[in-house]
Image (cartoon, rainbow, N blue to C red):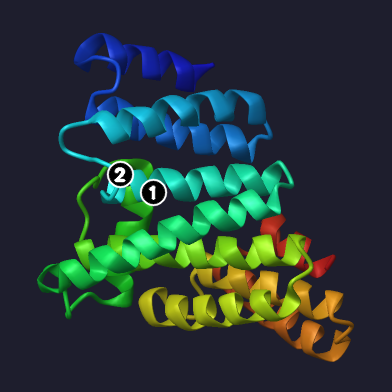
Amino acid sequence: NAGLRELRSIEDKSGMRSLSWLRFARALAGNLVDNSRLSEAETLYEQVHQGVLEHKECGSDSFEALEVLNGIGELRLKQRRSEDATLVYGRALAGMRVLQARHPDTFDPDLTREKSAELLRRTASGSVPQASARFQLEAASLVALNGLGNAAVQGKEFVKAEDCYQQCVAGRKLLLGTEHEDTLKVLNDLAGLRLREKKPVDAERLFRQVLEGNENLLGTNDPRTLNTVNS
């Protein structure tokens, strides 16, 4: 497909396992996971993870390596391997907290929610690979925390899932704002947890928050809004 052709083009220009190749390959592997092409994603993530570990600018404790772990965690969730997902997301979160403690001087205290949202969009597209260190670490840490919550739900560890989701909601509201799509995503996850816990009143309240946010952000006809309506 187009993604694989672009990956080969980058390989021809800068070499396999160059930093640009690794970043594009990681994004492509995530896209394969989203499209349930799990076997292909597994193979590509293995190459990317090994490449990041061996790259002179990266290593096992680098942000690049921890981002790969977040992607592998999502793959494990899609494979219904909740214990493996918990291990991978746990490693990612622990590593990011070490980086946050190691480099507090790189954090930008003036980072606004608007800048955060724009950085998230542009970083995801690959146009800003070196966005604010504070933003990158906090946003990626919250991805890992959300993933840990999802893995806990798969494993029927609802108390643990609750703790992860609540921390993630608080963090994303602070970093991105109440009606950012990632904040709404974890609120939707929390609403789903309430249904599993047989708390329909709480679930309905949360789903209404998500629905209102999606309508404001995406419009009434967006598939994500319609999915919330059907929840």
Rendering coords of residue 197 (x, y %)? 84, 81
- Residue carrying label 1: 67
* Residues at marks 2 and 1 touching, judged by CB atoms closer than 8 Å: no
Residue at (50, 32) in percent of width and height: 29
Rendering coords of residue 204 (x, y %)? 80, 84
Q: Residues within 10 Å of mark 1 (few under 14, many from 20)?
A: many
Rendering coords of residue 185 (x, y %)? 60, 66
Left or right side of 79 for 12: left
Left or right side of 103 for 162: right
- Which is more toward the observer, 122 or 55? 55
Question: Can you name the residue that lies furthest to the left here?
Answer: 105
Tag 2's secondary structure?
loop
User: Sequence-wise, which precedes: disc 2 or disc 1?
Assistant: 2
- Which is more toward the observer, 231 or 16? 16
Nearer the viewer's eye, disc 2 or disc 1? 2
Kindly indicate the quadrant of the structure image that contains residue 161.
bottom right
- Residue carrying label 2: 60
Residue at (55, 49) in percent of width and height: 73
